[in-house]
């Protein structure tokens, strides 16, 4: 959620238009979220992402014919 909010604000503030500018804003927003995650892990002493708390891939859906 932080990455999405950061990307939105960066896109609006830079008035990003087109794919290249929007992609750059998305990368910057992702970097903000990544840095926040690393800082939280450093200060809390715990990993945010672990094998126990990740979402598993959705099971394949049965298609109707």
Image (cartoon, helix red, strand yellow):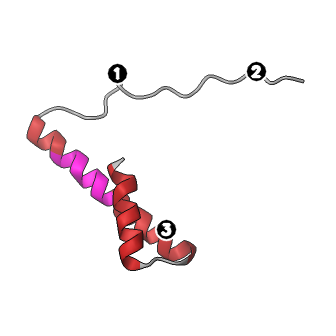
Label 1 sits on a secondary structure element that is loop
Q: Whole-Å distance between the Cαs marked 1 and 2?
A: 27 Å
Foreground: disc 3 or disc 1: 3
> Residue visible at 46% across and 76% down?
16
Estimate the x, y position of residue 37 in percent, counting from the top left: 24, 46
Q: Which of the labelled discs sits on residue 52, or is there none?
A: 1
Residue that mark 2 sits on: 62
Estimate the x, y position of residue 55 in percent, counting from the top left: 45, 28
Magenta stretch bounds: 31-39
Q: Which of the labelled discs sits on residue 23, or is there none?
A: 3
Neighbourhood count class around disc 3 (C-alpha, 10 Å): few under 14, some 14–19, many 20 upward? some
| Quarter of image, res 26 | bottom left
Q: Are marks 3 and 1 in contact (CB under 8 Å)?
A: no
Q: Whole-Å distance between the Cαs marked 2 and 3?
A: 34 Å
Q: Whole-Å distance between the Cαs marked 3 and 1?
A: 31 Å
Query: In this picture, is 46 found above or below 13?
Result: above
Classify the position of the C terminus by image quarter: top right
Estimate the x, y position of residue 5 in percent, counting from the top left: 36, 56
Query: In this picture, is 43 found above or below 35?
Result: above
Q: Is residue 20 magenta?
A: no
Q: Would you say the magenta stretch is mainly helix, strand or loop? A: helix
Neighbourhood count class around disc 1 (C-alpha, 10 Å): few under 14, some 14–19, many 20 upward? few
> Residue visible at 80% across and 24% down?
63
């Amino acid at each position: 959620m932080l990455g999405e909010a950061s990307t939105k604000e960066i896109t609006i503030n830079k008035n990003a238009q087109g794919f290249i500018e929007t992609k750059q804003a998305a990368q910057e927003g992702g970097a903000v979220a990544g840095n926040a995650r690393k800082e939280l892990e450093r200060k809390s002493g715990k990993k945010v992402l672990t094998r126990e708390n990740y979402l598993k891939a959705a099971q394949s859906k049965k298609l109707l014919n």
